[in-house]
Image (cartoon, coloured by chain):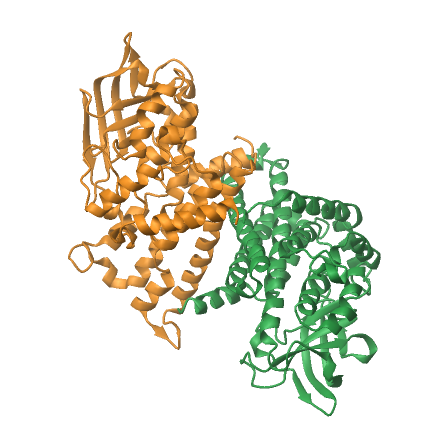
Amino acid sequence: MSDLETFRRETRAWLESNCPPEMRRASQGESDTCWGGRKWKFQSDAQRIWLERMAEKGWTVPDWPREYGGGGLSHDEVKILRQEMRALGCRSPLDSFGIWMLGPALLKYGSDAQKREHLPKIARGEIRWCQGYSEPGSGSDLASLQTRAVDHGDHYVVNGSKIWTSYADKADWIFCLVRTDPDAPKHEGISFLLFDMESQGVSTKPITLISGASPFCQTFFDDVLVPKANLVGELNKGWTIAKYLLTHERDMIGGMGQTSESRSLGQTAAESVGLENGILADTVLRGQIAAYEIDAWAFRLMMERAGDMAKAGQAHPAISSLLKYYGTELNKRRMELVMSAGGTDALEWEGARTRDGSQVRAWLRSKANSIEGGTSEVQLNIVAKRILGLPDA
Amino acid sequence: MSLVLTSEQTMLRDSTRSLLVKSAPISHLRRLRDERDPVGFSRPLWKEFAALGLPGILVPQQYGGMGLGHVEAGIVMEELGHTLAPSPFLSTAVLAATAIARGENEAQKQEYLERIVAGDLIATVAIDETGKHRPEKIALSAARSENGFVLNGAKTMVLDGHVADLLIVAARTAGTPGEIRGITLFLVNGGSGGPRAERTVMVDSHNAARLTFDNLKVPGSAVLGTVDGGWTLLDGVLNAGRAATAAEMAGASEEAFARTVAYLKERRQFGRLIGEFQALQHRAAHLYCELEVTRAAILKAQQALDESFDKAGPIVAMAKARAGKSATLAVQEGVQMHGGIGMTDEFDIGLFMKRVRVMQELFGDSNFHADRLARLGHY
């Protein structure tokens, strides 16, 4: 038996005996997600136990080095772990922007002290991070950001405002892009700072979205003092880190639609629309659903291939733009089909029957997928220029 | 299994590519077309294929073949798509070789496989009877007679059917059209003793023929597989053909795309390169994404055939459906972005559109496979 087969067998056995049954039921959406952090209240003992056991193995971040709280697994082992978790229906023990975005950036650009300080707390779900990127005047043109950090000897003083800061009101720390040289060209005067959201001068205001939820905030910085040790990488070189982190954010958003699919769309539609002679009564919708299922299947394989190519050193660095663009457009398509299949039943906004309109709200939420983390149009610009080499206007 | 090619597979791709670039660039297709070549492909080129072992790619080593898999067959198909080279690779090396090698009849394997490997036998399958691919509706009848069967009916879109030495004919020995039970495969000689063959000149200048069976007698030993139980083998052969066709479409669409992107970087209008226009950049970038996603799907389908041939049907259907759609988009965008010159026969881009149109239909178009998958999903 090969080492990988042994690993698969042992992993399955460990998951079977350590994943609580409650954590093997299909997630009902974001309310079942464990985000961790200082303010986190576990929804159940099972959720807490599952996080603790996985964190102890380092499997909340299986590919990170062991010294920083990770599992130290190879690419193939991580793939097997995910396959086995999927096969047993295990929920993710911990989801966070620390895992998906900051962690990879710190591993590449952080100092040893920064890695030791922050990575294990991310791996154990002790500190929840938020992302300070977009500003009211800087959306797609992110590099035009205006939040200032001024050198005051042993610390910086930060002033300005960020917007679309996901879960800023629930987060403990922020990774934040700030302008440290206002006279340099826009990409060359940006630095990457980390600071505690409980610092004096930080305030947040939730923004109510079309879904009725308020996952995003506007965040204000009023003379916030940040120690210089919290600068990641070099001064004024933050754009490189920002872009690297964005590729991870795009992978995360691109994969969003994939994780929640517990049942095929065709099955859902068969129940709500009904069958005639064994096929969906709405034959036009049937064709659209089948086309969607084919594309979604192929996209899952594309994500798998992107991982294999990265391992083989063949992946184009801008491939995350492809994944982000394709995955989010696909997810929006899925939500439109879900709504179409559900008819007027899917339109209820309140009430226990629809879990307060979870479906209609998820449909509205999905519209942000192709905007956040760089719009679809920005991703197409990146593919056109960086992969296809098409000329600048 | 990793979704990237191994170094051996990359070498196979490179050697096939250098053969085709040297011996069968697009001018080769044009010459066969313009000279109205009676065979429709180059027999010397097929011998060059044989020198590389390509006709035997799917033939087990004990019969002289390379004993490789559908990933490797797909690599050759993809390269054929790049230069649009007509060859009996699909009919003989993929379809017929798969049918005979999986037919579980030792005498038939002995008789035919080594000749396929050597490039001495052109073989094909005769399945479709109507313009749309509906294999379960096979009606061509095979009635029992004293020593064998008598075949009556007609086949259409038989690849290389007018020059094939051997025809693998799907016929009905029981049941009614629409039923998968009652289908039997027969090995029938082509040429003067075989069915009447009428070459049908197609839009892509690749070979196809109509066959008419008028009380054609075949012996009992001509049965490939089991009487009435031919569907499983037929379906497997079709899946091999679908994956191979998807791979050729991937090659054709990527070549069309590469030529289109190159054109966007050289054609000037309004005082600048047309590739500077965001309207075109976004369409090209979207097309790139579609082609990459399709590439992953096709590779997975080929691997599925190699790992578990009989269970690969759904994933092959998915790959064929994807390939048909993204290749259609690639050639349509190719002609549109070339503008007026793309409409001329002199320019190659239109040849890709013609070939993709044919491959979209072969062994079921995107709608056929989407319908199959919906049925499998019970909706």
Q: Residue at x 30, y 16 (%)?
A: A149
Q: Residue at x 71, y 50 (%)?
A: B83
What x and y, as percent, mark residue A249? 38, 36
Location of residue A313 (image quadrant): top right
**Residue A374, how many percent across, how many down?**
39, 36
Colour in which the image shows chain B:
green
Q: Residue B282 appears at what percent x and percent y?
A: 49, 41
Q: Colour of chain A?
A: orange
Q: State which quarter of the image contains the C terminus of chain B.
A: bottom left
Q: Nearest the camera: B49 or B191?
A: B49
A219, above or below B206, in the image: above
* Residue at far top of view: A153
B226 with respect to B148 (left or right):
left
Q: Residue furthest bottom?
A: B146
Does residue A289 appear to the left or right of A316 in the view shown? left
Q: Is residue A343 visible?
A: yes
Place of residue A316 in the rendered image (x, y in percent of width and height, measured from the top left): 53, 36
Please say whether residue A380 is visible from this viewpoint: no
- Up the image or down, A137 lies above or below B39; here it is above
Which of the two residues, A130 or B224, is positioned nearer the viewer here?
B224
- Asked whether, in this view, residue B48 is left or right of residue B93, the answer is right
